[in-house]
Image: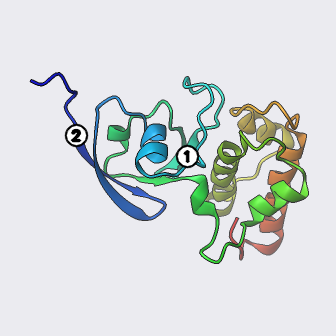
Amino acid sequence: MNGQPEKHPIVIAVNGEKHGEYVEPRMSLSDFLRDKLGLTGTHIGCHEGACGACTVLLDGVSARSCLTLATQADGRQVDTVESLVDDDGRLTLLQEAFVRRFALQCGFCTPGFLMLATEIVKEAQEEGRSFSREALTERLSANLCRCTGYVPIVEAVEEVLRTHSDSNGGERA
């Protein structure tokens, strides 16, 4: 032994593209995304999973990437905030609603909120779930925001949910 930690091979599909790497067993998914792949949209706030700034979708379900080991994502699909913009640079309806409703200020928590909200909108579209304002506020309270007071964030998600229920979903959330 040379005193160096043993590295493990992993293959993770990130934003639809497979990436194979050797990683140390204790490397977090957030560090993998930021340091190995250069995807810095995933922010790291507390390193404890409390703030939600590092939220990504892991096989379509929100996950705290600072608490998830990169090895735990082996063979799985990870979607980061970078996945939300089209190839032509067009924002999603959700991102546009965040801008329109002033749901972002400093922007640090925004990627985590967008990923959590993407999961919520997907549930509404694919599972036909509806969310009361109280349920939506409760769900979004899983992430911390120190700037907006949450109301604009809730309003932005409500706007997109209304748009989808009115149009039966033809556009990307």
Q: Nearer the viewer, residue 163 or 20?
A: 20
Q: Is residue 145 left or right of residue 12?
A: right
User: Residue at image x 83%, y 37%?
Assistant: 134
Image: 69 above or below 107: above
Image: 141 above or below 167: above
Q: Say which amino acid is labelled 2.
A: His
Task: Kindly identify which residue carries mark 1.
Answer: 56
User: Residue at image x 73%, y 31%?
Assistant: 144
Instruction: Mark 1 or mark 2: name the one nearer the start of the chain.
Output: 2
Mark count: 2
Residue 35 in percent (x, y) is at 45, 43
**Mark 1 in CB contact with mark 2 (< 8 angstroms):** no
Residue 90 in percent (x, y) is at 71, 73
In front of the other: label 1 or label 2? 2
Query: Residue 103 has which mark?
Result: none
Q: Quadrant of the C terminus?
A: bottom right
Residue 38 in percent (x, y) is at 48, 51
Quarter of the image for residue 166 reads bottom right
Residue 9 in percent (x, y) is at 23, 46
User: Residue at image x 82%, y 54%?
Assistant: 98
Task: Kindly identify which residue carries mark 2.
Answer: 8
Q: CA distance from mark 1 to mark 2?
A: 22 Å
- Within 10 Å of disc 1 (Cα), the crowding (few <14, some 14-19, many 20+) is many
